[in-house]
Image: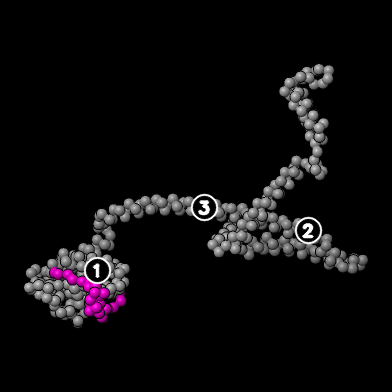
Amino acid sequence: MLGSLTQIRRVAHRLVCLRTKNTEGAPFRNGKELYKYVVVRTTRAIKYLPHKGPQISMCAAMWSLIRKYLAVVGLCALAFCVGSMFLSTWRPHIIRLLLRTFEAIVMASGTTRFAVVYWGIGLAVAVWLVSVADTYRKLKKDTVTQRPLREAIEQHSRQAKITTWTVILFSLFAYGYFFVEVIRTDHSGLVSQNAQMREANGHLVYDLNDRKRNIHVGDPAYEHIKVLFGAFILFRRAIGDKAPCEIKISAPTDSSGPSDPIIRQVADVAAMASGCGVFGPGDGRMDPDAEKEAVTGMKPGLIILHTRKDQAGSLAFYDTLAPYLPLTRSYDDMPATVNRGPTPAPILIWFQFSKDVNWVR
């Protein structure tokens, strides 16, 4: 050990000082001679360094290192997959990823699942069986051999091991490659989708803020408001400009949801366009009679339009709103006139809303 280190130190010293090549003091004549001296002396020094076990070549050492690295990576991946299978949150994702990897292999092969299994495993097994059968046939003709089948299998055992390991390693390599490819494709797809969603969200936020402040004439909501205004204006013209009137609206207490905005739109537009007094819907928690009146005869998903049979303008009013609201007419059970001032106004229209009323179009 000391001698080897001394030779290395001597080489380093001569490289630094560039003194002489030998004890006679002959100088180095050129760089090639210096390079040869360094290589020879260093190789001799390293050769005698202490080491454990027999000396191995550089290729063998690199291959051993690569195998250990692959083994560590494979064990880590196996441990991750097996460990994830015991986690309820990860299990469906791992199973789905493994199945999608197999589907990617099938698609890349341009064939079916059966063909992948057949050509990958079935063909190798068939070749081995044919080889064993051929050897068995030859040994059976030999009268000296007492167990031809066993000897045939033993002769081809090495072939079976090589074939098995070749199929396994090739399958693992293909599966590993497509496993990474599927993850990369999914990641690329998610990144692209996220970018598209961010861009779409920006447009949606701008559109939402715009619709908060402006009514778009191409939207259904604008058409709904226009139809409501037209229907109530025509109704006012039919009953006369100065005729007293009331419009009643009733709805169940728990009629929130799609019915609520429609009730508010009908009430607001009726008050402005018809000039009639609009009342309702009443609070069933405060007035039990109002709740009873609202649910009696109610039809789910419909609005019952109560009017007198001979009410002027009622048919035109129904025909205007029927294409947009789920209406059905009724001539019965008109509520009595409520004295709200010096001149009582008769109730000419009663909207009886039910739950979950939606616009027809």
Q: Indicate yes or no whether the magenta region holds residue 70.
A: no
150 left or right of 234? right
Sequence-wise, which precedes: disc 3 or disc 2?
A: 2
Give the residue type that dot 3 points to: His
Q: Is residue 69 above or below residue 17?
A: below
Q: Quadrant of the N terminus?
A: top right
Q: Which residues are magenta?
A: 276-301
Q: Quadrant of residue 123?
A: bottom right
| The furthest residue to the right | 144
Q: In the image, what residue occupies the spot 71% across and 46% down?
A: 65
Q: Which mark is residue 251?
A: none
Q: In the image, what residue occupies the spot 77% across and 60% down?
A: 160
- Please name the residue that numbered disc 2 is placed on: 159
Q: Is residue 178 above or below residue 122?
A: above
Give the residue type that dot 2 points to: Gln
- Please name the residue that numbered disc 3 is placed on: 187
Sequence-wise, which precedes: disc 1 or disc 2?
A: 2
